[in-house]
Image (cartoon, rainbow, N blue to C red):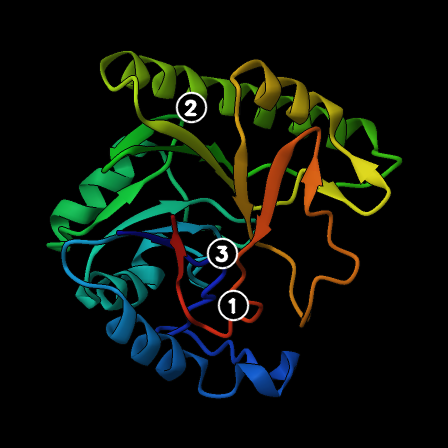
Amino acid sequence: MIYTISDPHLSLSCDKPMDVFGRRWENYTCQLESNWKSTVTDDDTVIIPGDISWGMTLEESASDFKWLDSLPGRKIIGKGNHDYWWETFSKLEKFKAENDISTIDFLHNNAYLCENKIICGTRGWICENSLKPEDLKILNRENQRLQMSLECAKKLLEKNPDAEIIVFMHYPPAVTGTVQEIIFDTLLSYGIQRLYYGHLHGISDNAGLCRTKYGIELNLVSCDYLKFIPLKID
C-alpha cells in the first residue's frame, strides 16, 4: 500500500511546540505515531511532502529522522518551506549512512517506482496573484525541478507502462482565485491526473480549497487536516 501525510513538523531535538497553533496539535507526535503504527505496515510506503523537522541542520534533525526511520514502512520525503536542513542529494545520502537510517529516501530532482505508482515532485512556491520578481524566479526554478523529476518519472514509465505518475508538492499550485499557470502547463504536458500537497493548516473541511484544476485532482494532506492519520492512495 502507498500512503501520504505532510507537515509532521517534528521537533524532538529542539524546542518548537506546535500546540501554539491550536488544540488539535496537542500531543501530535504521539497521535501520529499511534495512527501510523495502526495503519502502515513494513511493506508499505509513505510519501511525506515537506516540513519534516524544525531542526536547522541535519545534525539538529537527526533525532527526528531516527524517529521516522523507526516507524513501519518506507518513507519518501520531499522538501518543505521549513526544512532548512535540506542539503544536496549526496549529503543527504551520506547523512543516512552515518546515522544508520535505512527506510528513508529523498525526493530530490528524481522519481521512485512504488508498486504501480511513480512518485515525483518538488517543493513548489507561494501561490499568490501578484508575485515579486524574486518570487517569480523561485517559482520558475521550482518548475524546472518539477520537470527534472517528471523526466525521471517518464523514464520509469517506459519500463512500467501500466504505472501512474503522481506528483507531490509542498505548496499547493492553486488556491481559490489563484493558479500557478506555469506549474499546470508542466503537469498537463506530462498527463498528470493527481497531485498531493501540504503546507496549509487550520483547515477542518474543504471550504476554500481548490479541489480540481484543468482536470487535475488536488489533494491536501497536511497532518492536522488528516487528523494525523496517513491517507491511503488507491
* Lower sequence index among marks 2 and 3: 3
Q: Which mark is residue 226?
A: 1
- Residue underneath mark 3: 51
The residue shown at (34%, 61%) is: 61
Look at the numbered disc 2 and give the secondary structure of its residue: helix
Q: Which mark is residue 149?
A: 2
Are the residues tagged 2 and 1 within 8 Å (C-beta)? no
Looking at numbered disc 1 in the image, what kind of residue is underneath it?
Answer: Leu
Is 105 drawn above or below residue 232 in the view shown? above
* Lower sequence index among marks 1 and 3: 3
Tell me the distance, in whole angstroms, between the alpha carbons under discs 1 and 3: 15 Å
Towards the viewer: 148 or 2? 2
> On the rendered structure, is 127 left or right of 124?
right
The location of residue 141, given as percent across then percent down, is: 60, 23
Looking at numbered disc 2 in the image, what kind of residue is underneath it?
Answer: Ser
Is 160 drawn above or below residue 203 in the view shown? above
**What crowding class fits label 1: few (fewer than 14 Cα within 10 Å), some (14-19), or many (20 or more)?**
some
Towards the viewer: 201 or 101? 201
**What crowding class fits label 2: few (fewer than 14 Cα within 10 Å), some (14-19), or many (20 or more)?**
many
Looking at numbered disc 3 in the image, what kind of residue is underneath it?
Answer: Asp
* Lower sequence index among marks 2 and 1: 2
The residue shown at (32%, 40%) is: 106
Tell me the distance, in whole angstroms, between the alpha carbons under discs 2 and 3: 19 Å
Is 41 drawn above or below residue 109 in the view shown? below
